[in-house]
Image (cartoon, rainbow, N blue to C red):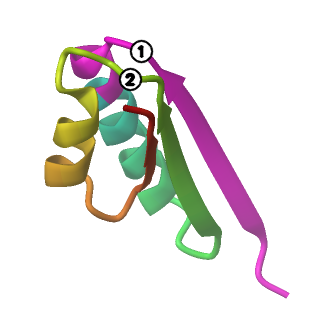
Amino acid sequence: MTPSLAVVVVSYNVRDLLRACLSATHASVALAPELDVRIIVVDNASADGSAAMVAAEFPQVQLLARR
């Protein structure tokens, strides 16, 4: 059975920190290819473009964005 891991990040107006977090998370996940990993970002209606950044730069991330 393949191990599974879900990483959930909740954000609000922290676009640059979120970018760094997702980059670091992807780098760490790459070290464990045997894991089945799902990364989810929940954006709480940020006004700084966080959701758009996630959609554009991290298409593999599941994005749940409030408007």
Quarter of image, res 50: top left
Compare residues 15 and 44 and report the one nearer the observer: 44
Near-viewer residue (23 or 15)? 15
The reply to whether the C-beta atoms of the residues labelled 2 and 1 are less than 8 Å apart is yes
Disc 2 is placed on an element classified as: loop
Rendering coords of residue 55 (x, y %): 23, 51
In the displayed structure, does residue 48 sit left or right of residue 42?
left
Circle 2 Cα neighbour tier, 10 Å, few/some/many (<14 / 14–19 / ≥20): some
The residue shown at (26%, 53%) is 58
Q: Residue furthest bottom?
A: 1
At label 1, which amino acid type do we have?
Tyr
Q: Nearer the viewer, residue 7 or 30?
A: 7
The reply, left or right, for residue 58 in relation to residue 43 is left
| Residue 2 falls inside the magenta stretch | yes
Q: Which residue is mark 1?
A: 12
**Residue 27: x and y, percent?**
37, 48
Q: Residue 51 at x, y = what percent? A: 28, 36
Question: In the picture, which quadrant includes the C terminus?
Answer: top left
Q: Is residue 36 left or right of residue 62?
A: right
Please tell me whether mark 2 or mark 1 is closer to you in this view. 2
Determine the secondary structure under disc 1.
loop
Q: Residue at x 57, y 61 (%)?
A: 38
Question: 61 or 44: which is nearer to us?
Answer: 44
Q: Is residue 9 above or below residue 62?
A: above
Q: Residue 45: which numbered mark, if any?
A: 2
Marks 2 and 1, the one that precedes in the sequence: 1
Q: Which amino acid, by three-letter code, is at mark 2?
A: Ala
The quadrant the N terminus occupies is: bottom right
- The residues colored magenta run 1-18
